């Protein structure tokens, strides 16, 4: 297991390097002058040229890219924000916990709703509940999150006045954005849980457990669900990583001061160091989520854990034969 984790960590290096190059290239080729954006339209050409020289924007593409990678690898320096003049790492870490909280609340809602509805739909296949749940899940998958967020604001904030429309100043402010993201993700989890459960409950060991007189709830929860959770956990891990980056629109709709909204504002201001650092952190978080999901496989399914042990035992034998 430790060897596998080490290999996965090493595989993250080229992925993150590719993200750095792609994002840096896109921001470099994006029209607009960051120096002009910082100083404003009324600044003189000499002042803009002087600031560009100070920021190193007049250097060639490869010089800027190598300088950025060198500072990141050897000094862990993401640069300073063009707008606030503060270190990018401090600006990002100040807002990233807000994004993590929003993603965590959304995933918790999606898991509770999606897994529960998926289990009931699988055990009551072709029933009225199954048809209604499947229809709702299709609507949830097809509905854009930003549109759902706007509709939630209009209904629950403007007309009903039950919940606040924007901000993050208390627990009430988290209800609408969390439900908007969570219910959208629960549709995908529900469909995966249903299909996985339908495949498992038709297996021979499920029929054997029922034939031995096991309670139906015990059969579903302890026998069927545990073996059906592997693909579901994969979807949950992917959704959590996606929500870390996909909460950009929801943070903008509900005016939440998280990393996503910060990146959007930085794109509009051509604050390249913030955009590059924010996307890099999101890519790193997504890779870590995938790694944790793979590790969790071994604790849920003993067969996967035994494969790690078996490969470890076979290693020395190959060396001896060689």
Image (cartoon, rainbow, N blue to C red):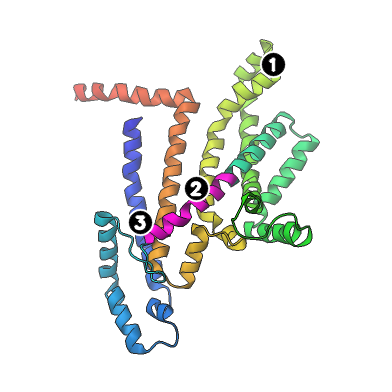
Q: Residues within 10 Å of mark 2 (few under 14, many from 20)?
A: many
Q: Nearer the viewer, residue 162 or 15?
A: 162
Q: Is residue 30 visible?
A: yes
What percent of the width, then of the height, locates residue 273?
Answer: 37, 65
Q: Which residues are magenta?
A: 88-105
Read off the residue under disc 3.
Answer: 18
What percent of the width, then of the height, locates residue 35?
Answer: 37, 78
The tag earlier along the polypeptide, 2 or 3, is: 3
Q: Is residue 169 left or right of residue 6?
A: right
Farthest residue to the right: give it: 128
Whether pointer 2 and pointer 3 mark residues with C-beta atoms closer than 8 Å, the reply is no
Quadrant containing the N terminus is top left
Say the numbered circle drawn on residue 215. Answer: 1
Q: Is residue 28 magenta?
A: no
Main secondary structure type of the part rendered in magenta: helix
Residue at 25 percent of width and 60 percent of height: 70
Q: Nearer the viewer, residue 307 or 20?
A: 20
Helix, strand or loop status at disc 2: helix
Q: Residues within 10 Å of mark 1 (few under 14, many from 20)?
A: few
Q: Is residue 202 visible?
A: no
Helix, strand or loop status at disc 1: loop
The tag earlier along the polypeptide, 1 or 3, is: 3
Farthest residue to the front: give it: 169
Quadrant containing the C terminus is top left
Residue at 63 percent of width and 49 percent of height: 171
- C-alpha separation, residue under disc 1 versus residue under disc 3: 52 Å
Read off the residue under disc 2.
Answer: 241
Helix, strand or loop status at disc 3: helix
What percent of the width, then of the height, locates residue 123?
Answer: 71, 29
256 lies above or below 181: below
Q: Is residue 16 left or right of residue 190?
A: left
């Amino acid at each position: 297991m430790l060897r596998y984790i080490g290999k996965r960590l090493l595989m993250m290096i080229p992925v993150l390097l590719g993200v750095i190059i792609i994002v840096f290239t896109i921001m470099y080729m994006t029209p607009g002058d960051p120096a002009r954006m910082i100083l404003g339209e009324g600044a003189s050409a000499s002042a803009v040229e002087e600031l560009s020289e100070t920021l190193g924007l007049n250097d060639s593409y490869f010089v800027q890219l190598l300088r950025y990678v060198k500072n990141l690898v050897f000094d862990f320096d993401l640069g300073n924000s063009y707008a606030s003049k503060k270190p990018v790492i401090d600006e990002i870490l100040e807002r990233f916990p807000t994004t993590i909280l929003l993603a965590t609340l959304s995933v918790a809602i999606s898991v509770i709703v999606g897994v529960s509805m998926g289990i009931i739909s699988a055990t009551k296949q072709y029933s009225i509940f199954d048809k209604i749940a499947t229809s709702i899940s299709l609507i949830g998958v097809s509905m854009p999150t930003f549109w759902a967020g706007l509709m939630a604001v209009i209904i629950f904030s403007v007309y009903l006045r039950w919940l606040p429309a924007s901000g993050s100043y208390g627990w009430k402010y988290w209800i609408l954005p969390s439900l908007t993201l969570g219910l959208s993700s629960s549709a995908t989890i529900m469909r995966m849980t249903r299909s996985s459960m339908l495949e498992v409950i038709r297996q021979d060991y499920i029929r054997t457990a029922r034939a031995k007189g096991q309670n139906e709830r015990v059969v579903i929860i302890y026998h069927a669900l545990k073996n059906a959770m592997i693909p579901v956990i994969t979807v949950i891990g992917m959704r959590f990583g996606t929500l870390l980056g996909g909460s950009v629109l929801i943070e903008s709709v509900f005016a939440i001061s998280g990393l996503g909204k910060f990146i959007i504002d930085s794109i509009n201001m051509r604050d390249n160091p913030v955009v590059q650092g924010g996307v890099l952190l999101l890519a790193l978080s997504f890779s870590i989520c995938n790694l944790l999901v793979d590790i969790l496989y071994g604790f849920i399914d003993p067969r996967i854990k035994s494969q790690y042990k078996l490969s470890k035992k076979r290693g020395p034998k190959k060396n001896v034969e060689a």
